[in-house]
Image (spheres, grey):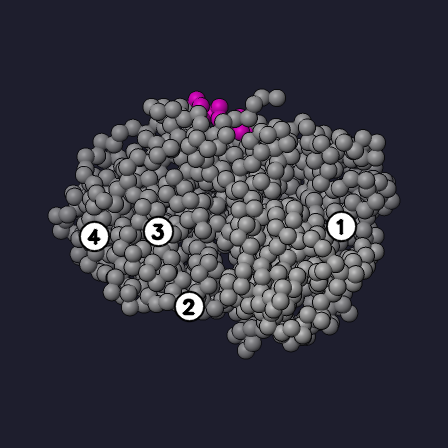
Amino acid sequence: MSPLPDLIFEISREGKTAHGLGASRVQSKPAIDPGLLRTAIAGFPQVSEVEIVRHYMALARLNYSLDQGLYPLGSCTMKYNPKINEKLASSEDFQAHPYAPHELVQGNLELMARLEEWLVALTGMAGFTCAPAAGAHGEFTGMLIVRKYLKEKGDPRRVVLIPDSAHGTNPSSAHFAGYEIREIPSNAEGIIDVEGLRPFLKDDVAALMMTNPNTLGIFEKNITAIADALHANGSLLYMDGANLNALLGIVRPGDLGVDVMHINLHKTFATPHGGGGPGSGPVGVAAHLLPFLPVPRVVKDGGKYGVVFAAPHSIGRIKNFYGQFLVMVRALAYLCSLGRENVRQVAEDAVLNANYLRKKLQDVLDLPYPTATLHEVVFSDKNLPVKTLDIAKRLLDYGFHPFTIYFPLIVHGAMMIEPTETESKETLDEFIAVMKKILLEAREQPDLLLQAPRQTPVRRLDETLAARQPVLKWRKGENR
Amino acid sequence: MELEKLLFTKEHEWVRLEGDSAMVGITDYAQHELGDVVYVELPGLGKELKKGDPSANIESVKAVSDVFAPLSGTIIEVNPKLAANPELVNQEPYSEGSLFKMKIKQPDEVKELLDHKKYEEYLRGIAGE
Amino acid sequence: MRYLPLTDTAREEIKKAIGIDDCKELFKSIPADKSYFDLAAIPSALSEPELIAEFKAMGRKNFFPGYLSFLGAGAYAHFIPEVVAYLSAKGEFLTPYTPYQPEVSQGNLQAIFEYQTMMTMLTGLDVANASLYDGATAVAEAVLLAVRKSGRQRILLADSLHPEYSAVVRTYTQNLPIELVTVNVNEADGRINLNDLQAKLNDQTAALVFQSPNFLGVVEDSAVLAQAVHPQHAYAVQAVAEAMSLAYLRPAADFAVDVVAGEAQSFGLSLGFGGPYLGFMTAREEFLRQMPGRIVGQTKDLDGKRGYVLTLSTREQHIKREKAMSNICSNEAWCALRAGMYLATMGKDGLALAAGDSHLHAAYFVSKAAKSRQVRIVYQKNFYNEVLLEIKKGTAEAFLTALKKNKILAGVPLNWFYPTVSNRVLLAFSEVHSREDIDRLLQAMGEYS
């Protein structure tokens, strides 16, 4: 295995240059007080263009990526990122300055409007904002909408109910929107039911944040009854749409009583994860919440597109400019490519694949809930001679990226597996075979798991050391 | 460290009475559950706490845990070694890894603490679940 | 369909293995009357050639490419070396998830570690995070950070902050017990009015949030601002909209600024009609455990090899939930990686060149326009790369319309943000503007009446 690449600062040498900027032919003197000007940036890299390419190629080789193989992370929907979408998003035609006059960017405004129309058609919500930059940003936006709506009705209320299986961004977003969190337990089926909800449904409850399907992969089948109970209480239903992939073309959240929801373009809509971002988290609302959407909003006036920058009941602006526009380009291209002929197949294949894995692995792994699951399945490490972590690390040796581990919190040693619809049966069979092999190793040669991974560029990393003695940047002479 | 001389809470804090003050830390069970401690946030000197108030904060790599004041009182000492050596909480939870000392405000509350035998019983109960 | 690898045969095999006859059985738990809804409203699929044609048709409705642009105000056109576009497009960087399995993510982790390092070199501060959404939300997060760290609830916001930044700060704090107070700006020099600052500063102030270079293009005297607020134990938080300025102006740390947060789109990200961009935050060491967002740290593996991991995760929502420093999960990781590539490629001398020329081109324009009969340069010194013009005759709209006829986008009219200011425009200059470009602008300006 090749040695790990040095840091760019370590290969830097005085006098090398990688840029192609020439000297300006403008003659001018600075117009700033000299005391405000810097001298050179000490330690900044000086390498040649050749070394830039070699350095980043070496870094690229260290990454496992979705382009390489299966990435079955639960609730992440790691589906294939189509390459034509990359080409379209990098087209010069779309790279306008966000303050370009509207008459010069009608194409861009049309693109955003068309994406919103698609999202309305797929979800049954009355309108969307594509401004939020990520799912959590969408959750925060949605909860601000809830609060403003209720405030204008006379009482913003104090509490948001959140199931114990929820993703951490749910309580966090509600908190920053000014709410107190009250956690409600999932029942024996792994879902929420109205009887379990009632004791919590006091008159200080603003909303329930529900992920559907939830983080166990289970459809919250009581959603309509829950929505009715909430509405009767003067509360709203927020739906975390991270798992929308299971419902695409099958059912519309707007038909189920959802008042406000977010979706993740970087999950359901195939835009690339980029190693952690950028995402995009559009928020859809029912008709009574339309006036509260953030600004700016794209509007159609006759044959032309315009933008509304202020609206009397809007929660305000939540981001610079319009949102993650180039992510929207990719999402619209994806939807146009799927069309009505294929959207439903996405959900059906995603659910088929996940249930196939469930069926094939449920005799070797513990399934904490017998309830039917959709696009993902969660196993626990009960009765195993090794920990979930060790299984995950051994998967790396077999060239697979592991599933999500230790989430949701309500399952011990959770293994959350979502294959998505973009995996072939051959890949799934390979994964199943490897999992069975690893579980056999767990009983007969556990050291193979405990010492895993061995085939990766680095072995297990000391996260304790990283947190106890944080080294968060390079310092000359110190990093080796 | 003689555990029999300590008193305990159900939140896995231990208390060593020293006259009208109490030394406080977390138990071996707690440090084991937390994993490698990476950072400890201690209360400020002079801080007034009621029994049950969050007093300190212990972070491991994957979790963060509140330490609740076992008694009401005022913080008079904090362990200076934990800033540089948070691992002492794992290694010596009952001695070098203690957290802080407080001046007791309501001596009656001492009765509500568990003795070592009752705490051991409580731990066995948790393990059985 | 090419994104759906399951063949009908495979589907039958899977259904058989699961024990169902029809896919509909998988969705039994969904209310029957709502499920399998009518798809008629959804457009029909486009083939790949049709898709390309469709997007080209939309692109043809954009007429901005024919114009010489001096638009700035928070998004800046800088030259992006080809290697940056080439390398950042690689699937190994674009398609992985967040590096929660660090053993197979060392490429992204090391690249972000390098980015963090370079951001601290530019601001002189101790720590940088691995990105936030954009400049506006980065400033909002800095406000929340200052409130958290200080335990105080009063925030002074300079009136010369980018109006979108102030707007986002207001949205973020609308339901929180945080008081926002505006500090006035001198018309004379475009800088913060120190008397107003002193009048509004008190022992409940968590921080002064000021932008430099500010929305009017003016570079503040940060040392004076920090000196004004520190005696009250309030923080000096600097917002930055034009990150290129960091490579030309003295590092904020030299002036005792505590936090620098803002927009790093200038570092290698295309204009992209506003996003995705790159929020950055750097701060002094003491803020570390309160900082929002992911952070990459160095460590060792079992064999003692150097490696990188996401660290100090207990600050974040997946562990601390409603007590987390921020709700942020997905960030702008790929944008940060690309910015790191840009900074490394431009390097010490290239970045200095681009940053220097950005200012010098603005200075050239100012010196040539000083005697203009059509416009007045409002701030003739201590601007970075943006220049505020007052139109002497007629309105800003009339001026811009006239220049638009010459295929020039001569800046952003201030009345977009300040409706009562009808005769001012803000222009931005960068290293991409040639001398001919600026002369053409001056020529067209000279012809305006």
- Mark pair 3, 4: CA separation: 24 Å
Circle 2: element type? strand
Judged by depth in the image, the label closer to the viewer, 4 or 1, is: 1
Q: Residue tagged by mark 3?
A: C257
| Residue type, numbered disc 1 | His
Precedes in sequence: disc 2 or disc 4: 2
Residue A392, image quadrant: top right
Residue A178, image quadrant: bottom right
| Residue type, numbered disc 2 | Glu
Q: Position of residue C280 (x, y in %)?
A: 44, 47
Q: Are marks 1 and 2 in contact (CB under 8 Å)?
A: no
For the point 29% across and 52% down, which residue is it? C222
**Residue C284 appears in the picture as rendered:** yes
* Label 2 crowd (10 A; few <14 / some 14-19 / many >=20): some
| Residue type, numbered disc 4 | Tyr
Circle 1: element type? loop
Image vertical order of residue B16 relative to residue B82, above or below = below
Q: Position of residue C95 (x, y in %)?
A: 58, 37
Q: Please say whether residue B13 is one of the residues in the magenta stretch.
A: no
Q: Residue tagged by mark 4?
A: C379
Q: Are marks 2 and 4 in contact (CB under 8 Å)?
A: no
Find the magenta span and give its range: A50-60
Give the prevailing secondary structure in the magenta stretch: helix
**Residue C397 appears in the picture as rendered:** no
